[in-house]
Image (cartoon, rainbow, N blue to C red):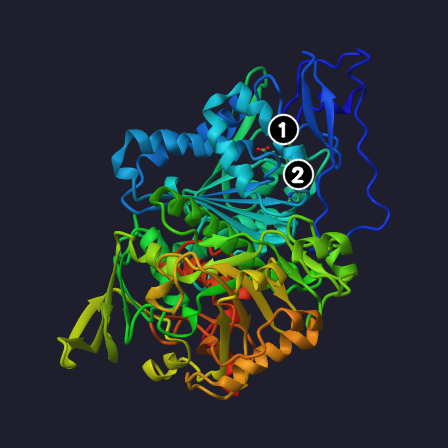
């Protein structure tokens, strides 16, 4: 009997097996001899099988089961998971700014997610009160489908269900490279967040943090969509049900097409009351479940049980308008908060105001990547900046991220070509010497060993700032903060404001629900609970090359013991740096002076940047001007903790004072994902970082304070 059609538990369970030649039983491919180490992703092996009606359907090579039935997979998904979690009614009744969280076991082709997204869109179009509500869809996948297979699979649905076509396009455009860990995809126009946790579901659910948020987050509805227990027990294991209980609260629901004993017992012994209902189509039954009132003592003792979030913060003051503050402001504003962002000087006046920031991660061996903040942050920032690019295109303003690709010459890295080969090419690869020479324009350098990052590029810091400050929920004020006071129900930020041309100052106080201190090394001055950080001065240099020099200089950003990049001046650049529109520029970064917080421009540091480049790529001595005295430069102070991790979270013994700081030289890569985590903590939602990572980032971590 065909494994493919016969399992009564299979979500497809298509009528009877046939013996047609086209319908050979599908054999699961043998597991690879050497299993991948934990935390290294094995992509799904997709096979295509012909169903009873002669349609091609995708089958999992690992489990030998279908992902969905061709005839009615979408209708089945809507029946089992959407209708039987009462999503149409529950989502329609969300309150202003309320977040509803769904967790799914087994992302597979994303069909359940697409069906949910489409329902959410329909409801939002009909019900204006849902404008500020948010849908958070958390899913897990151990064997993610490679992008080219997924594209082929979803093309079927785009054809058969045209209402999904636009959503499919967006999902595919944002589909992450297949590396372990959490990938946050924000579909901002629809207020829907998809967190795809790649790895074993048990590990991923255990990574969800419930402790650091101001209110304990919980799952509202579970989609239990593992393959049938008979072909995959791992998604129906005791450890999964234990996590479900931990992450649920009374009234959390679950739905599954499976009525297997192991499923019923698992749910019942972990606090769910179960109910058999009519299954989809010709299937006799399926299972729904609801967490009983007395089954989750943790949830019962928690204030998140209060009917609907009574105390959602509505106004936040962000102190510091560098990249950390700007991204924090934008993320909170995007969650519906009113944000006042303040700076003692001006937005981007500090270290974040370099004309361009190179978005290129420091790589790590792949088995560490799932908790490697640089990699996670790099991927998330890229997605966010590409979304910002779409906004910029609509507004006909300069792009935020110029996706140039970056070539790393592997002079100062902790990873070699063998380890780069473990990565999906979409994220990191080694290109041939010929290709490296062609892309870079170099002629003599040995480029056999290299790291090419195709999605990397240059962030236009000015353009990013301008776009963020246009957000309707954000207002900027110049203010030099002198005092922050917290009471039970608010926080008061007092500071001196420059007024008039004769440098008069007036003192003003702003009241808010929360304050986030994003003042880099000066954060410590504002609240002594924020540890004092190491200050590392860095000076970036740039010059305007002649047409002849442009022809001989590298064509894309290069990383060596420093980094360099060509770029073209854009409107807005001149607001902060001396750069004219449309003029080619070449930048070289950056000096490194420990324990120095001054920002004067030093000719010897321009020279150091020059020397570093020529030492690593001597052939450029023919091209670079000998005289660096006319070079432009900008000096800033990088802020670093002793363990190199940023500070993200709420301060000890405080309900309302938070920080996001100490990003070192990686603010443009780290701030977006850290701001997401901070917003989630503030609003009682699940963060896109594991509990272990959040503990590592806590401003109150013991390690910092011992030192
Ligand atoms: N929800 C999917 C959709 O809409 O297309 C279909 C899910 S499919 C029936 C089950 C999925 O569970 C497969 O993609 C499989 O790789 C995944 N899976 C199986 N065991 C897993 C585990 N231990 N952890 C995470 N995912 C797992």
Going from N to C along the chain, the mark reached first, 2 or 1, is: 2
Kindly identify which numbered label has been placed on residue 153: 1
Can residue 135 be seen here? no
594 up-or-down from 136: above or below: below
Mark 1 and mark 2 in contact (Cβ < 8 Å)? Answer: yes
Where ligand 1 lies, by quadrant?
Answer: top right
Q: Does the closest atom of ligand 1 sit within 8 Å of the Cβ of label 1?
A: no
Q: Nearer the viewer, residue 295 or 515?
A: 515
Q: Nearer the viewer, residue 315 or 348?
A: 348
Using a 10 Å C-alpha cutoff, classify the residue at mark 1 as few (fewer than 14 neighbours), some (14 to 19) or many (20 or more).
some
Toward which corner of the image does residue 297 lie, by quadrant?
A: bottom left
Q: Nearer the viewer, residue 136 or 320?
A: 320
Question: In the image, residue 314 lies at what x, y percent?
Answer: 25, 57
Left or right of residue 63, residue 506 in this image: left
Q: Does the closest atom of ligand 1 sit within 8 Å of the Cβ of label 2?
A: yes
Question: In the image, residue 391 lies at what x, y percent?
Answer: 38, 45
Q: CA distance from mark 2 to mark 1?
A: 10 Å
Kindly identify which numbered label has been placed on residue 131: none
Q: Nearer the viewer, residue 570 or 274?
A: 570
> Which residue appears at 49% of the width and 78% of the height?
539
Write down the residue under mark 2: 145
Question: In the image, residue 589 lies at what x, y percent?
Answer: 55, 73
Using a 10 Å C-alpha cutoff, classify the residue at mark 2 as few (fewer than 14 neighbours), some (14 to 19) or many (20 or more).
many
Toward which corner of the image does residue 617 lie, by quadrant?
A: bottom right
Left or right of residue 364, residue 100 in this image: left
């Amino acid at each position: 009997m065909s494994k493919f059609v016969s399992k009564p538990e299979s979500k497809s369970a298509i009528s009877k097996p046939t013996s047609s030649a086209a319908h050979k039983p599908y054999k699961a491919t043998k597991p690879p001899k050497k299993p991948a180490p934990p935390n290294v992703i094995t992509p799904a092996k997709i096979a295509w099988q012909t169903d009873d009606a002669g349609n091609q359907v995708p089958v999992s090579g690992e489990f030998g089961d279908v992902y969905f039935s061709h005839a009615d997979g979408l209708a089945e998904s809507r029946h089992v998971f959407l209708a039987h979690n009462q999503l149409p009614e529950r989502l329609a009744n969300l309150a202003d700014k309320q977040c509803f969280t769904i967790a799914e076991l087994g992302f597979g082709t994303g069909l359940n997610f697409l069906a949910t997204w489409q329902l959410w869109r329909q409801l939002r179009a009909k019900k204006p009160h849902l404008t500020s509500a948010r849908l958070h869809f958390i899913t897990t996948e151990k064997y993610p489908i490679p992008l080219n297979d997924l594209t082929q699979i979803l093309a079927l649905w785009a054809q058969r269900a045209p209402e999904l076509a636009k959503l499919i396009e967006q999902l595919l455009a944002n589909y992450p490279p297949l590396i372990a860990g959490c990938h946050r995809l924000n579909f901002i126009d629809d207020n829907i967040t998809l967190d795809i946790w790649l790895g074993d579901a048990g590990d991923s659910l255990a990574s969800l943090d419930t402790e650091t948020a101001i209110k304990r987050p919980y799952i509202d509805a579970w989609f239990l969509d593992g393959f049938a227990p008979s072909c995959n027990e791992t998604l129906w294991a005791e450890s999964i049900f234990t996590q479900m209980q931990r992450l649920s609260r009374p009234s959390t629901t679950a739905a599954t097409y499976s009525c297997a004993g192991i499923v019923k017992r698992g749910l019942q012994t972990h606090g769910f009351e179960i109910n058999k209902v009519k299954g989809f189509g010709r299937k006799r039954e399926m299972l729904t479940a609801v967490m009983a009132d007395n089954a989750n003592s943790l949830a019962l003792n928690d204030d998140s049980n209060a009917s609907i979030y009574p105390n959602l913060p509505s106004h936040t003051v962000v102190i510091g308008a560098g990249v950390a503050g700007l991204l924090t402001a934008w993320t909170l504003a995007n969650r519906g908060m009113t944000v006042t962002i303040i700076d003692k000087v001006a937005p981007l006046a500090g270290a974040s105001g370099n004309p361009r920031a190179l978005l290129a991660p420091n790589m790590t061996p792949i088995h560490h990547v799932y908790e490697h903040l640089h990699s996670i942050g790099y991927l998330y920032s890229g997605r966010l900046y590409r979304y910002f690019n779409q906004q910029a295109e609509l507004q006909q303003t300069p792009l935020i991220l110029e996706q140039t690709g970056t070539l790393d010459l592997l002079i100062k890295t902790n990873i070699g070509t063998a380890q780069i080969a473990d990565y999906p090419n979409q994220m990191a690869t080694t290109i041939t010497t010929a290709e490296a020479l062609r892309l870079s324009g170099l002629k003599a350098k040995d480029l056999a060993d290299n790291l090419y990052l195709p999605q990397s590029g240059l962030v236009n810091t000015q353009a990013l700032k301008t776009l963020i400050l246009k957000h309707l929920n954000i207002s900027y004020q110049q203010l030099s903060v002198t005092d922050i006071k917290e009471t039970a129900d608010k926080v008061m930020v007092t500071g001196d404001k420059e007024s008039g041309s004769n440098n008069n100052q007036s003192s003003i106080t702003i009241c808010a629900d929360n304050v986030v201190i994003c003042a880099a090394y000066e954060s410590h001055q504002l609240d002594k609970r924020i540890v004092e950080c190491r200050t590392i001065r860095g000076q970036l240099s740039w010059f305007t090359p002649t047409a002849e020099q442009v022809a001989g200089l590298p064509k894309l950003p290069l990383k060596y013991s420093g980094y360099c990049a060509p770029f073209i001046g854009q409107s807005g650049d001149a607001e902060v740096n001396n750069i004219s529109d449309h003029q080619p520029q070449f930048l070289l970064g950056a000096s490194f002076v420990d324990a120095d917080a001054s920002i004067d421009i030093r000719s010897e540091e321009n020279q150091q940047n020059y020397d570093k480049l020529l030492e690593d790529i001597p052939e450029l001595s023919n091209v670079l001007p000998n005289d660096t005295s006319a070079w432009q430069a900008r000096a800033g102070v990088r802020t670093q903790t002793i363990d190199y991790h940023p500070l993200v979270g709420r301060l000890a013994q405080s309900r309302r004072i938070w920080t996001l700081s100490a990003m070192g030289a990686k603010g443009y890569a780290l701030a977006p994902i850290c701001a997401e985590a901070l917003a989630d903590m503030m609003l009682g939602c699940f963060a896109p970082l594991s509990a272990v990572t959040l503990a590592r980032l806590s401003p109150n971590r013991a390690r910092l304070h011992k030192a």
